[in-house]
Image (cartoon, rainbow, N blue to C red):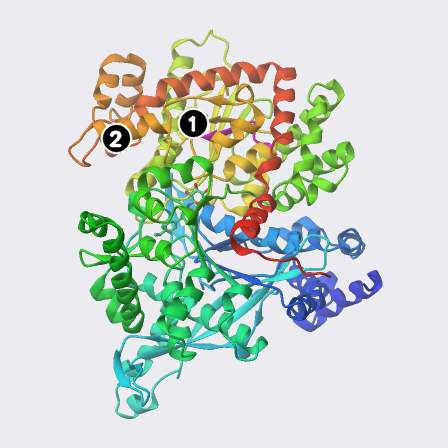
Amino acid sequence: MQKFDKAMLKKEIENNARKLFRRELTELNEKEAFHAVAAAIQNQIIDDWILTTKRAEEEDRKRVYYLSMEFLMGRALGNNILNLSAHEEIKEVIEELGLNLSALEDAEPDWALGNGGLGRLAACFLDSLATLGYWACGCGIRYKYGFFKQQIVDGYQKEVADDWLKDGNPFEIRRAELAKEVRFGGWVETVQEADGRLRFVHKGYQSVEAIPYDTPVVGYDNHIVDTLRVWDAKAKETFSLDEFDKGNYQKAVESANMARNIVEVLYPNDNHYAGKELRLRQQYFFISASVQTAVDSYVKKHDGDVKHLADKLAFQLNDTHPTVAVAELMRVLMDDYHLTWDEAWEITVNTCAYTNHTIMAEALEKWPIELFSKLLPRIYQIVEEINRRFCEDVRKKYEGNAEAKIAKMAIIYDGQVKMAHLAIIGSHAVNGVAALHTEILKKQELKDFYEMYPEKFSNKTNGITQRRWLLHANPELAEWVTEKIGDRWITDLSQIEKLAVYAEDKKAQSEFMAIKRHNKERLARYIFEHNGIKVNVDSVFDVMVKRLHEYKRQLMNILHVMYLYNQIKDHPEREFYPHTFIFGAKAAAGYKTAKLTIKLINSVAEVINNDASIKDKIKVVFIEDYKVSSAEVIIPAADFSEQISTASKEASGTSNMKLMLNGALTIGTMDGANVEIVKEVGVENAFIFGMSSDEVIELEHNRSYKPMDIFNNDQEIRRVLMQLVNGFYSPEDPELFRPLYDSLLNTKESDVADRYFILKDLRAYMQAQEEAVKHFQDREWWARAAILNTAHAGKFSSDRTIEEYVKDIWHLDKIEM
Ligand code: 26Y
């Protein structure tokens, strides 16, 4: 490796200023300086990036394609610098140029090509893949507008378009030479070949050109650079001259518009399926382009032999969103490479694997046959044949009760194409994302498939990258950890276990708590700047950051705050430890109950924060526009980690892991990965409450739950609920929060009241909170438990997760650099 040359980098940054802006570096504003520096960093990366591909090809490595509609990358500059081997020197250069690195970082927009957990997981996985030295390509969509920006106006969420590319992205490279054609609509004609074989010819289709933009994914200190490839769409011909000549301007620009629409915007739904045609268009668009290039580049390398493709290529389907890949790979292998059905099917199944991220029924993707077959006629034909053969297998296997099985398991049934069924049938591996989640899949949701293909199923508990979530987000704690146990934890988080011996050490405890305090001061400054609220850094920082969803139960959290406020008002003389409730959450634009919950949190904040009589004992803070870059400020400052989903509903959760790693204690239900967190850290170092998943499932089945009983019998809870409808928090419109009240108590609007058992768990939650606050005041106890949470987070590295995928599903070898 070449020795890093500081003087050269300095020169380059200065040159970039002139080249990009025709001004001197010193004359640039922060955003411009960001571009000058980013371009120079990209230049540091580029040789390793090219070399990684070259090495991987020479060594004939297998490559994993992580197919995902979402990649929630956050910002790249700081992370890229950190991962480069010369990061210390680079930081020095930036300082010596009189630039402020963190200000430069703040000038970069977040790459918000994702909604929440699933998209962020994809980003953590890419970081781990590169760091572990595996050859990987993340494939997705280059949305013109990423996840919307959230503004809070008068307490309500307002969505603003995220024009993240308007100043250009210095890390992307347009790879026009790799463009692919993607076909929509039309019909399929069957032609008999001379040898008697049938050929299927797609006619009358509309073409869209897919153009890839590659960005580097830098491994930590290892010179490996993987790729995130996102596809842009262009009309094949900008407009049809033919139509234009005939004076039909409308028709002429139609295909240009169609192409533009495909990549226009990320759907802001999380765990909720909407069935929009454009979404299926997006899915097929990026999948067809990705599958075609993957197969092409494999075939080019292997002298036209496509038969051993599954040995060198893996497609991981991030939920069902990329599932058309199964049929698209079949199409390419049969129509373009002339394999027989059986040959193509074996390769396809051995290449594809599917990860399930949810058991929420409303998240299941299913497309009406008419829509699917019109948009993707050839693909539909292939799905029909997959389904026909599958049903045949079921008939053979389950003589006597085959029709009942088919009704539950067929891909095409009741006029719908069921994507999860296609994903399972077309994959050799199916996994859930936490132990409990996988068990529920096997025993309930996917029981029939598990019975038919037990060998396909496995668990892969999620993880997070410690490089972003500790090293980058919490530099002070990172340095402290390194000082105590060395720096191997950066690439092997199991090392962090060694911190456990410091849990009882008084000096270590006070150092750890001092760092927590600095991070709380940093967050307090952020809150003051953004919300104008002064928070007490000695108070408990109680953090709930995640998408807003009823099953996650932000409503339960705020009901508890309302209860505490009543207590303080009734008993001003009682001791009350100051408590800051911090929320960050976006609601899907069309999700009324979720949006009203945001309004409620803000209304409660308004009343409580401005009530001088309670002497700042409680503050409620709703942080606007929660995203990766704000998470990096919030998470290191947390004392409590709120993980309070209805047991069985949260597949895994990953903010629970980020918060644990940063020394927060979990207040949570036995759901998702919380179960494993508690197993690692010990139930005595967390605050666990509420119904178990078995109890929830049982209660859902027997339909005996009556939330009204709780309303009738618990005075304090009743009072809180009445405050939703008596104008206590909305004097100008007392009925404002009625829908939330109804969702908990009335069956008239939805079919069940309190679907997520908020009232059922509320008492237990209040007690867990009280316990936690009591323990928080025992500073020694708390410091010990907080250190132990960090120390026992080793399992939750995405490096560990990726190694499991590699060993059980992908079978990759490392690139030798
Ligand atoms: C169908 C469509 C609109 C849809 C779009 C996004 C459906 C689901 C999603 C997103 C799901 C998601 O983010 N799931 C989360 O995945 C995380 C990573 O595995 C889990 O930690 C988390 O529990 C789960 O809710």
Q: Does dot 1 land on a helix, a strand or a loop?
A: loop
Earlier along the polypeptide chain: callout 2 or callout 1? Answer: 1
Crowdedness near tag 1: few (<14), some (14–19) or many (≥20) residues, C-alpha within 10 Å: many
Numbered mark located on residue 669 in the image: 1
Residue at image mark 2: 700
- Name the amino acid, label 1: Thr
Q: Is residue 233 left or right of residue 415?
A: right
Q: Is residue 359 left or right of residue 712?
A: right
Near-viewer residue (741 or 319): 319
Q: Residue at x 66, y 57 (%)?
A: 814
- The residues tagged by marks 2 and 1 sit, at their Cα atoms, a distance apart of 17 Å
Q: Residue at x 56, y 56 (%)?
A: 811
Q: Position of residue 267 (x, y in %)?
A: 37, 56
Q: Does dot 2 land on a helix, a strand or a loop?
A: helix
Report the mark closest to the observer, 2 or 1: 2
Seen as rendered, the residue at the extreme top is 573
The correct choice, above or below, for 240 with respect to 90 in the image is below
Residue 814 in magenta stretch: no
Q: Position of residue 467 (x, y in %)?
A: 65, 45
Question: Residue 564 lies in what quarter of the image?
Answer: top left
Q: Which residues are magenta?
A: 637-643
Number of dots carrying numbers: 2
- Name the amino acid, label 2: Glu
**Image quadrant for the N terminus?**
bottom right
The correct choice, above or below, for 467 with respect to 243 in the image is above
Q: Position of residue 716 (x, y in %)?
A: 32, 14
